[in-house]
Amino acid sequence: HVLEDDAFEISRGDVFVVGGRTVHGYRNTHNMAIINLMFSEELLTRNAAELLGIDSYKTLFHFEPCYRQPSKFRSWIRLESEKLECIIGQIREISRELKDKKTGYQIAAVASLTSLVINLCRLYGNSQDIGPKVYNRLSLATTYINNHYSETVGIEALSVVSHMTPRSLQRQFKAAMGISPMHFLLQVRMKKACAMLKQTSLPVAQIGQAVGYSDNNYFTRSFHQAMGVSPTTFRLKHS
């Protein structure tokens, strides 16, 4: 499986999620049947918003595709024959509904897709492999950071929401993401600050406060260290 600039070996029963804008393809697929199932998450969750609250869904469909590292690629489920046949049967049902276009086929197809996604989430969540369990917990930490970057965020708070000790969180986070939780927080804050500098005319100090910096001088220093230029210079370059 070729994913942007990297390649990963796959085999029978592998199921993995790729973001809609990610360039990917396959090579050396002799004697291998590959099923690509493309869908809109908005369509899927329109009548099943509860999916967005399921930890294994957030991890499998959001966290791993977004943050996977080539050297730590664990973003697939390897299905045993019985479970694989069940999933393939659900895919065939979706295909049949879309092909036959009988009364209510769109509703039926979405219902089958929802059932398939739930089954995958259950398989992922019940996996005995250490990867999914750790990723589920790291997903809680990254979600918390993305939702609370404008507040004071520390290792203790992240360890509580991720159900890990501070030491374990930092070690597992670095292993999976390649950076520390605090560096990830910095990246989120800088990304938000850059967007606000480009898209608004708010004062730099106000933007700093909006992304979690009560001290404007500290925000300016942090921004310059991360981006190589001051917030003011960055805004001028992108105005």
Image (spheres, rainbow, N blue to C red):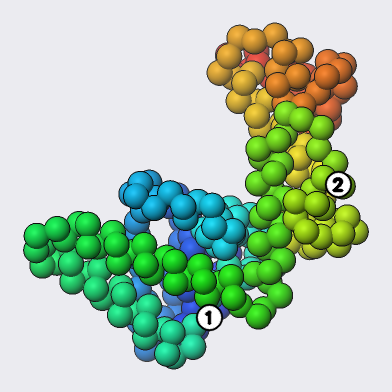
Q: Is residue 214 above or below residue 24?
A: above
Which-is-in-front pick, marks 2 and 1?
A: 2
Residue in front for this viewpoint, 55 or 63: 55
Q: Which residue is mark 1?
A: 78
Q: Is residue 182 left or right of residue 62?
A: right
Which image quadrant for residue 94? bottom left
Which label belongs to residue 103? none
Circle 2 SS class? helix
x 71%, y 75%: residue: 130
Residue in front for this viewpoint, 222 or 85: 85
Q: Is residue 123 left or right of residue 127?
A: left
x 83%, y 15%: residue: 216
Q: Is residue 222 left or right of residue 184?
A: right
Three-letter code for the amino acid on which mark 1 is drawn: Arg
Q: Which residue is mark 2?
A: 155
Q: Is residue 2 visible?
A: no
Circle 1 SS class? strand
